[in-house]
Amino acid sequence: MNFNTENLDKETLLHLYKAMVLPRTIEEKMLIALRQGKISKWFSSWGQEATSVGSALAMNKEEYILTMHRNLGVFTSREIPLDRLFSQFQGKMNGFTKGRDRSFHFGTQEFKIVGMISHLGSQMGVADGIALSHLLNQEEKCTLVYTGDGGASEGDFHEAVNTAAVWNLPVIIVVENNQWGLSTPSREQFRCKSFADKGIGYGIEAHSINGNNILEVYQTFKNLAESIRKNPRPILVECNTFRLRGHEEASGTAYYPEGMIEEWTKQDPIANYEQFLLSEGILNQNLIEEIKESYKKQVDEALDQTIAEPEIIPNKKTELEDVYAPFDNQEILPQKLQNREIRFIDAISEAIEISMKNHPNLVLMGQDIAEYGGAFKITEGFVEKFGKKRVRNTPLCEAAIVGSGLGLSINGYKSMVEMQFADFVTEGFNQIINNLAKTHYRWNQNADVVVRMPTGAGTGAGPFHSQSNEAWFTKTPGLKIAYPAFPDDAKGLLIQSFEDPNPVLFFEHKKLYRSLKGNVPEGFYTTPFGKARKVKEGEELTIITYGLGVHIALEFAEKNPEISLEIIDLRTLVPLDTETIYESVKKCNKVIILHEDTLTCGFGAELSALISEHCFEDLDAPILRVASMDTPIPFNKKLEDQFMPNEELAEAVERILKY
């Protein structure tokens, strides 16, 4: 192994050595602690220290690094106190996630590290968002994100690299090629000779280096980072190394061919560099022993301190409170009392424009939303008003763009992601339910992202442009779900969504866009979450609904004035206004739950369960659910009409009134 010391003084050379010895010392201790049952799991980076340490030390301390399983050297290079690091491993309160996540699954603003989740590749899009924030701030900063040879097969990787390339983001993408994805060798992961070829395929600069040579790693990343700060662009670097231990200790290494470990042990980054420093007179045996004994003592003391820490005492109130970032969910009334009648779609456009003016850190992202104005023309003219930096066309990369929204939030921005159709959210599903939803609960980082979801049937758009998929998300703690039925609520709720620092999925029924008009106040106002709207007073029967269901219920009420119907528009599904629901049920004693979504496991099932639990003695009839057919949404107009719940509502009302 050749070590090039050009432009490196003895102090730096020695510091790089020490920076690798510390994580190796921790590894040695953790492997013993694992066998003793003092820790539950360990993902080893033994033999890969040069990649993590060299690249991390090449970055400025205020620059973000997004890590993976085998980047212990990043955490130690950022000088995280060992007791806090070990507390994180042990699930103690002194860690970074209050015992809610394990090992390296955490982030910290203090040390500018964003950890991974178990779904490999998802941190890539987040890195894009952080890099974008630096670009928007005109800061000379670079973001560093790691992925593995296995993770580079994930769609998230390709979406994020493509987005970084298209937007020319200041990010270094590190592929740690340790030759194996758990038990699957690289030859079964990809066919190209080098991961650098993947970078070239996306039109970006790419390099392949020896990831076990600390000086090659450090100098490569230092030079690239300095270059990127002056000339923002993405660069991919493949670091060739080897995983000397199992994917995690329980999996072992029995699948390695005979002799492979021995061959790669000869390439050990610490042993080779140590011999080089000895030959250069920078190290001697006494100094080596002194360094290792010092680190061993630090590690022993920190682990003993962590083990002695008290166990977490569970507190349900604290757990529930930490799911969401704090927000004063207040109603702000309009300053101008006069109303004017505008369309549902115009109310949404107004809400976005007002929020863009109120929040200079708000960035809009979506397919065709810039000059074209989006598929429904909601952002038409916004480029002229706010510029292309804040109104951004995106590639067809939903996962990367939702991840970018989180990345923007991490560095102080707000963002809106427009799904061209709610159906397409499946491409970004993991980012929403596992990253946006869980981040505040896990490490106290809010996700200030609004995902707009044009939804619903009734427009003859067929199975892939018409689904009502709100129930996919209502069961995921950490998300807020808004679903307005009227133009004034669409505006007020959307403005509130932008005010709220939590992730909000905002459902907009496409059929209402241009067919529904209503009185909407001018200027800024907010509609609070979790406050249902009683759109019609009644005594005989309660209909609980939302979205287009409200208009189906109103149309039925207009045709049947002899029935005293009370119609409740939920407006938001999470949080849910149970107080208004229970009050109405207790008054009318009969209830129908109506929604456009399919019947089985639709949100109506949850409402029915809540009413059964809390209002059972007040009911004079069974709770009835009215919903669309349990089929995909057909394209043919007559078939679509049959699919919708309009006729079923009349039948349900007739049935329930007979009790």
Image (spheres, rainbow, N blue to C red):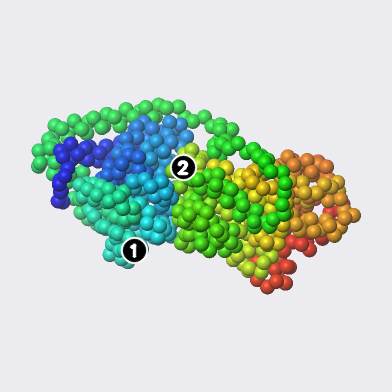
Q: Position of residue 263 (x, y in %)?
A: 20, 54
Q: Earlier in the sequence, mark 2 or mark 1?
A: 1
Q: Which mark is residue 412?
A: 2
Where residue 92 appears, x then y in whole percent?
44, 33
Disc 1 target residue: 203
Q: Which mark is residue 579?
A: none
Element on which disc 2 rests: loop
Q: Are marks 2 and 1 in contact (CB under 8 Å)?
A: no
Residue 591 appears at what percent x and percent y? Answer: 79, 49
Splitting the image into 4 quarters, where does residue 510 fall? Answer: bottom right
Front residue (pair 164, 596) = 164
Residue at image coords 67%, 41%: 335
**Element under label 1?**
loop
Instruction: Kindly report the distance in space between the C-alpha atoms of the residues bearing marks 2 and 1.
Output: 30 Å
Along the horizontal axis of the image, is 5 left or right of 96? left
Residue at position x 70%, y 71% in the image: 637
Q: Position of residue 601 (x, y in %)?
A: 66, 55
Residue occupying image coordinates x 55% and y 58%: 381
Q: Is residue 152 left or right of residue 408?
A: left
**Residue at figure coordinates x 58%, y 51% from the top left:** 352
10 Å neighbourhood of mark 2: few (<14), some, or many (≥20)? Answer: some
- From the viewer's perspective, tell me whether residue 578 is left or right of residue 427: right
Few, some or many residues within 10 Å of mark 1 (<14, 14–19, 20+) = some
* Of the pair 439 and 169, the residue shown nearer to us: 169
Can residue 346 be seen here? yes
Residue type (three-letter) at the residue carrying disc 1: Gly
- Does the rendering let one see residue 44? no
- Amino acid type for the residue under numbered disc 2: Gly
Query: How many numbered discs?
Result: 2
Q: Nearer the viewer, residue 415 or 566?
A: 415
Residue reaching furthest right?
562
